[in-house]
Amino acid sequence: MVRKHFGRVLMVGTAAFTTLAIEPGDADAHGPQHAVVPAAEPPAASDADGTPSGLLIPAHLLAAVCGDPAVDRNSGFKQRLQLAKASSDQVNAYGAAPPPLFENLGDDSFAITTSSDEAQRYFDQGLRLAYAFNHPEALRAFRYAETLDPKCAMCAWGQAYVLGPNINAPMDPSAIGPAREAADRAMAMRGGTGALEQALIEALDSRYSPDPELERAVLNQAYADAMAEVADAHARSATVQSLYADALMNVSPWNYWEEDGKTLKPPVANLVRTLETALANEPRHPYAIHLYIHAVEASQTPERAETHADHLAAEIPGAGHIVHMPSHIYFRIGRLRDSIAANRDAVAADEAYLAQVSPDGLYPYSYYPHNVHFLLESARMAGDGATAVATAEKLPATTIDDVSAMLPRVQLIDAAPYFAHAQFSEPKTILALNDPGDRLPYVKAMWHYARAVAYAAGGDADAARSEADAIDAMREGVDWTGIVEGGVPAPQLLELAGHVIDGRIQQAAGDYRGAVAAFEEAVAIEDALPYLEPPYWYYPVRQSLGAALLQADRPAEAETAFKAALEQFPNNAWSLYGLKEAQEAQNLTAAAAETEEKLKGALVGDMAEVDLARL
């Protein structure tokens, strides 16, 4: 079963730095809280478990990120541009101040023509940070490298490279001029460089044009075509192959696979082969591994990146996004314990970086909270209620309503705590969660969902239906256009939630036939959702269908449903439990024993928390 691809999560986090109104433990009694913005303080530390104990938001960034209220924000493209511009503005604000030379970014090096050893070190730092998708910090390093050696052509090339588009953000229009100027400087100085440097500089020059009428897509394709020639000429350079792969991916960002999950789409037909060539030459090249994970995670065979993923974090251990990246494979193939560990380490790495540098823009408002969210989802899928709920209580401190309203994908983070509570918390805890208000409609809808689940579990069908009615009213009454265009298929998710609530109500009433029908409706919607990691809907609804089938004394069908859920999410502790129960109900003793062993290995939390009512 292929989980369809829709686009990359663009998550929002924190930067430099103003305090939030949440403290550890607040959310347990009062529900998810969002940030207020008073005066600046130093960055917060992590708790011992790796979850953030409180985060900090820059007051000035609200204007930079949120922009003019009159601006049309219905376009996800425009929304991402605003964050990209905030990143560029922050780099400019640093001025000529030298960035730190970080000591924890590994030792990958690309030798360039320079008279300065320190310029080489800063160039290497910039390239490693580019590999880690921290493009603003990479830009600082490349710029400072050029100040150290004003004749360094590749230092200018690095600036032009990271000022361009990437698969998670379009090119900021305000960066076009600086990128063109950097590319021009690199071209002017290329005569004193080696053949490979000249080839890279000339290829990148095709990405930027003095003609303002040329569309970005045309320029991206021109750059990819030019890099194809460089890659052919330098087949043994993993760096060159990775740069070519990146160019290909930017021709068709997050749109690599046909529906079968096995066939690459024509614009990126060479993508996987290119990265596998790079890894054959340098198995631990960090950029090649990073891009390879992204290239195959939405395919039918994400496991092909597993061995490489195991080595990635050690290559650039101070870059949180690099440390996190293996979890995109671990989550897909069921290595949930490793996914939890990777994201704990990533959160710690990011917090150390944020405390040292205090950046604004895309990295702290995108990559960092994605890691926190991924930690929650990995723990929840593994049955680790303690970690999931602890992270749920603290996750809201990574977002602010102003940014969540502008970037709809962030509402997926904002809603995640309600899902964790719905799965692990007692009804009284869920019903004590504060109303999040109407500003973030998807979040408000999922608050209603969690309450409905709580009421259904407590046997109050009327109250559960009232919450479901509120969701239906929102689905029909809210204008979801901006949220849908921003990457969240909210109407489908609300409809799915309504069917799950109906199924829960029917289960509690003993109407298992009705529950089966409701969950089948939910499964049909879930199957049509695009691919995202973590997924749009927080668990495979087939496991609820399996539970209802088992309660309806249809264990063979239940077994099929649980196996299908495990195909979607391998090693999911909840589905393994259901499968074991279905096999035991059929007296499949050997199969049940085998499944029980898998369950023991998969379950991170307390077995007492796993029962049919929670599936």
Image (cartoon, helix red, strand yellow):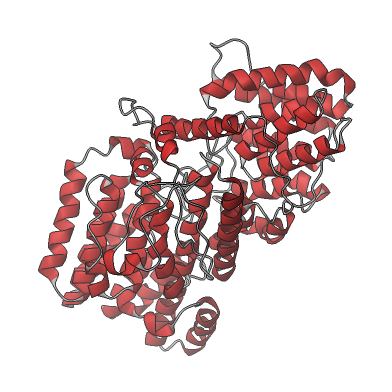
Name the side, left or right, on which 242 lies relative to 337: right
Identify which residue is drawn at 19% across, 76% down: 458
Identify which residue is drawn at 48% across, 42% down: 7
- Residue 418: x %, y % from top left: 32, 62
Identify which residue is drawn at 46% across, 54% down: 55
Question: Relative to residue 453, is residue 302 depicted above or below?
Answer: above
Question: Front-most of 599 and 394?
Answer: 394
Quadrant housing residue 144: top right
Quadrant housing residue 401: top left
Name the side, left or right, on which 99 lies relative to 567: right
Question: Front-most of 93 and 398?
Answer: 93
Name the side, left or right, on which 241 lies relative to 172: right
- Residue 376: x %, y % from top left: 45, 63
- Residue 102: x %, y % from top left: 72, 49
Q: How many marks?
A: 0
Question: Front-most of 220 and 525?
Answer: 220
Q: Is residue 26 visible?
A: yes
Identify which residue is drawn at 67% across, 24% down: 223
Where the C terminus falls, by quadrant? bottom left
Question: Relative to residue 378, is residue 252 depicted above or below?
Answer: above
Name, please, the residue furthest toward the left: 462
Question: Relative to residue 458, is residue 125 depicted above or below?
Answer: above
Name the side, left or right, on which 434 lies relative to 158: left
Q: Is residue 539 visible?
A: no
